[in-house]
Amino acid sequence: MEFLETDKSVFNQSSNSSTAMSNAFKSNLSYGISEFITYDAQITHLQTEQNNSSYLSSGLNTLTDHGSYRFLATKQLDAGYAYFAGFRGLLSNKLYNDINVNVEYSALNNFSSALFVAKENSLKNRLSLSLNGRTDFFNSLNWNMRWNNEVRKNTNTKNRFSLGINKSYVAGTWSSQLFYDDDTNNLINRLYSSIDIASWKWTNTLDWQANNGAELTRLRSSLRWPQTQSTFNQTQLTYQSNSAASTLLNHQYTYRHEIFNIQVSGQVDNQGDWRLSLGLNGTFSFDHLEADFNFDTPRSLNSGQIEVSSFIDWNENEIFDQGDEPIQDVNFTGNYLWRDKYTNNDGKVLLPSSYGGQVLDVNLRSLSNPYLQPSLGKIKTLAHRGGQTKVNIPLVVYNEVEGTIYLSSNEKSKPIAGLTVVLKEKDGEKHYSTVTEYDGYYYFPNVSQGNYILEIEKNEQLSENITIKNLPEQVITEKSGDTIILQDIIVYTNNADTLTEQATIAAESNQQTPYFVQLGVFKKFQSALTVANKIDKAAYALQLYKHERRDSYYLVAGPYNNAAKAQQTINDVYSIPALHGSFMVDARRYVSPQWRKIGEWSDMQTKNTETYFCQYGAYTSKKSVNKKLLKENPSLFIAERAIKGKAHYLMLSGPHNAKQTACDTQVIKQIKGLTTAIKKPWHSIFTINQ
């Protein structure tokens, strides 16, 4: 509910003629019919000096995976009616990447309001279409276009067109946009620039008539002060040639508290008129799960809520049913407003959400059992006002099973690489398969609770006449989760000639097999780059691999054609504390399917790469980095780059396998268009981090 009195001055009670209405009352009710549909009903009363008008409105809002639809019908009780419809969504194709589409239509019949003022050329209908996207040309250039068609009483149909381009770079943004009105035959060009100066941000907008002697029509210059988590300051100077008060100076200050914002702004023009504004806003809500009232930071009226239920899904059917257990104190990532929200004794929590799609994921650090894992991974949720989206988060207790297999004959043995090992459930259908690595090691992640049989599939390395020792009769995985390390399995062959031949081949292979020096193992890509920066890349051939199952990065040097050279590298890098644990490994270790080569530092010359990164933002100060965004998206990291002797900080994600999917659309939406995501190959990241 909202009541406005706009015709009086706070200081001297004098009449204010700057608004079309004197008083207004509005009451709105939104009800979530389903998880995707909201019904809106609204009563509005407007009072002006001439008359009073009342309105009844009713409409539907529908949210889908490809966009949102809106329809609203309004009846002016003492006059006519109006209809409003719209669509906002996202399209995609290979040339223009994601295309945002917004279509709006309005139809009025003998209808007037504060927005649609009654006059001789009152609006009858309006249709507008706007598109914006990004191309792969000119290093990801952004574009936007808009068409607006109006039909008014007693006038000709009017069309307005606009077309613009913009580009983000390390220190800011620039754009150019053309506006054409076929009614006035004016062509306006708007130039925009944004420059980061230390922790300050300076933006300028200039409008001039391109077809009328280059006349300057408008100039605006804004200076955003260094921000903190609790304060925001911005000063703005505006010049407008066709206004009586041609020059206007204003300043805005915002103080952010945990549960509210305070806004103070003031302005003065060249005629001596001034204005002072004070605002206080926040969000008040009721949590039916905790039966408690909540005060939160300001949120959009379009925002909704997500009711999350987390539980241990013992029968793994992704449904909370008999035998399943709710999990308390589970935290979620995807929105900074969730950082202090945890599930209650029933495994439930009510999360505030922004309008539209949002990705929800379990914060694994909040789980008391390290073997608990969400069975669905990340979940895209759809939230809308008036409704509560219910989301189930089933978690499963997983086990890890690992061991090593050797081939032995005549008291000689060697590890078996490339051997398929299978883990089968005794009385069920669960089936896990893996392949031994170069050292005979095998590993089964994410094994559910149960009773299993371990089997070894025969291949060309194993003859029919073999004996297997230490093969377990059964493998029992625990309900609480565990890492089970099985005893070494020995495969004995009675064919001595076969083993001798294999040993000879292995010996010859070993003479030709190069060595790597494993310098370190890292869970984060950025950590691997940080350590690599401490090593002389001209002296050592550095490479980076990723183990897909373990989700870890391995920094190695090499290859070396003999063990002596590899040992020399180990001795050389020992002076770096982070590399004290370096050791020599057989190069064949990184050949198995579980390993993926990210890149090597020699790629700077060849630029041959199939690994890509996405740049979401660039900052000139570490204080300006969006830390909330980094916390909500663990895949993001910051890379430092020196430009003209000055440090810049790039927000990146990766590495990714494909250029087309390198950038996350959800992260781009969280940035709210402040910058454009740019796909970068491996060699450019290597250059940045030198």
Image (cartoon, rainbow, N blue to C red):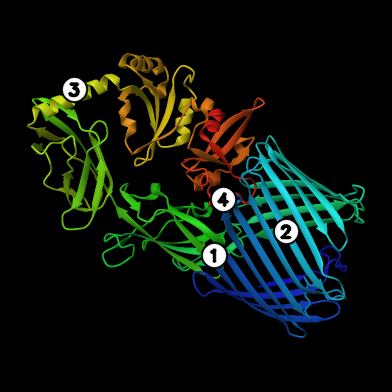
SS at badge 4: loop
* Lower sequence index among marks 3 and 4: 4
Contact flag, marks 4 and 1 (Cβ < 8 Å): no
Q: Specify whether 181 is left or right of 382.
A: right
- Residue 582, numbered label: none
Q: CA distance from mark 2 to mark 1?
A: 30 Å
Q: Within the image, what quadrant is residue 405 found in?
A: top left
Q: Which residue is mark 3?
A: 504
Residue at 32% in and 16% down: 562
Q: CA distance from mark 3 to mark 4?
A: 53 Å
Q: Which residue is mark 4?
A: 94
Q: CA distance from mark 1 to mark 3?
A: 69 Å
> Which amino acid type is marked by label 3?
Thr
Residue 641 image point, x, y percent: 59, 30
Residue at 16% in and 45% down: 455
Mark 2 or mark 4: which is in front? 4
Q: CA distance from mark 4 to mark 1?
A: 33 Å
Residue 582 visible to an observer of this rendering: no
Contact flag, marks 2 and 1 (Cβ < 8 Å): no
* Lower sequence index among marks 3 and 2: 2
Q: Which residue is mark 2?
A: 146
> Which amino acid type is marked by label 2?
Arg
